[in-house]
Image (cartoon, rainbow, N blue to C red):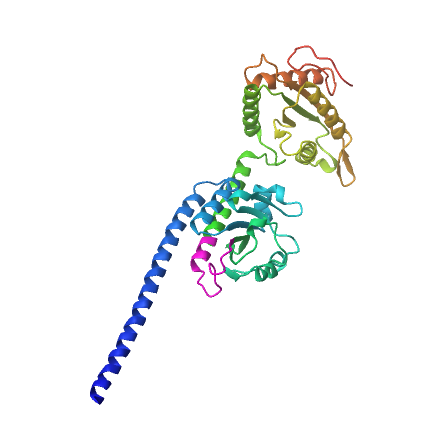
Amino acid sequence: MNGAGTQERPLAEVLKENQRLREELERLVHTAAANEEIWRHMVEIERVLFRTRDFDRLAFELLREIRARFLVDGAALILTHLDLVDRFFPELLNGGGAVLEQETGTCIVTLQKNGWLCDAPDKPASPLLFQGEEPLRRLLGCRPSLPEGFFPIGSAALVPLRIHDLNYGFLLLTCTDAAHYRPEDGTELLEQMGIKIALCMDNCLAYERVKDLSDRDGPTGLLNFFQIHNVLEREFRRARRRGAALSVLVVDLEFVDEAAEHEDMVDPVLRHVGELLRGTFPDGEGFIGRYGSVEFLVVCPYADEQEAQIVASKLHELIRRSPLRRGRTVILIKPRIGTATMTPSMQKPFELLDAAQRVLCLLKTFQLSVPAADASKDEVTPLER
């Protein structure tokens, strides 16, 4: 019996070891299958990431894909890179805020300025996993402007969006299930996803900068000659299609080209007037471009003839009363502004532009500043001398 007992003990241990190995193997197979599924999800997400350079349109689609494929209750981009926010979500710049898709549980936010992540010199470089919302709140320093659907948080993952030592922000994934993310879980795949999203952001910003170089006028930063013409053609088609008003202003400048020590003042004057124009026409209310040597073209959607005349008059006074000061030198600038408003008889954008140019030519001929007339007519009545 002693011999049998001695044989039974090793056999029991072997069976127990086999069971443990079987369970370990099942766990490894399950983990491998889960990782393979995550990689498939990441391939699909990569397709979303790299098929467009318009990050403002891409962002919500990306968040929806992440939320659906990773089975989380909420997905948010927390942006801390000012250039990224300024380019794609300028409405979030003033005091923080959020762009929400409440029904899909996704949002894009900027972290409050007093948040710890914004002020800390050593922001997290690797994903962090949380159980409960208090650790996340302590890290953020305050609650970001997230919709109520993000709370309460059972577990969460905060993924840094970082590349080339540039911090673009964080991807926040939240679940009501406290076991979905556990602090002891691996974060390698989340880290890879964060790097890919950051790379996409970097590409989007690079693309925007290339566009600036290709469609912006060097001295002023305004639209160049070709792009302002493209804008005019687009707005002309839209106005005809919708039966909306459309006006243009051609702003011509007269000033002393050389100041003290024969310094070339053309570019400084152009930049100065360009800033005045930017301040007069907020984003969406007018498109401004460099049209000629010392000429600007302003395209004013939805502006009728009377509104165009009022704007031209105010703009004339603003430029005339805002000389360029360079040290002890004051450069007086005299603008002439030709205006034209689209009429039913106009079929092409150049007809509207030609009408404004005819008005400007008459102003130069008679040494006037701003007309009060229907720009589609050949006869012009001066408004002021």
Position of 268 with respect to 107 (left or right) is: right
Residue 101 placement (x, y as % from top left): 54, 43
- On the rendered image, what quadrant is the C terminus found in? top right
Segment colored magenta? 173-194
Q: Which of the pair 258/101 is nearer the observer?
A: 101
Out of 360 and 176, give the one closest to the viewer: 176
| Residue 213 locus on image (x, y percent) | 54, 38
Q: Can you say whether 253 is above or below 156 in the image? A: above
Magenta-drawn stretch contains 212: no
Quarter of the rendering occupied by the N terminus: bottom left
Quarter of the image for residue 315 reads top right
Q: Quadrant of residue 133?
A: bottom right
Residue 206 appears anywhere in the view: no
User: Who is closer to the viewer here, 233 or 115?
Assistant: 115
- The residue lying at 65 percent from left, 53 percent from top is 113
Quadrant of the image occupied by residue 299 = top right
Q: Is residue 190 magenta?
A: yes
The residue sitting at 56% across, 55% down in the picture is: 152
Indicate whether 93 appears above or below 129: above
One can see residue 54 in this view: yes
Image point (29%, 74%), residue name: 17
Percent x, y for residue 21?
A: 30, 70
Residue extending farthest to the front is 1
78 versus 371 height, above or below: below
Residue 237 x, y percent position in the rendering? 54, 21
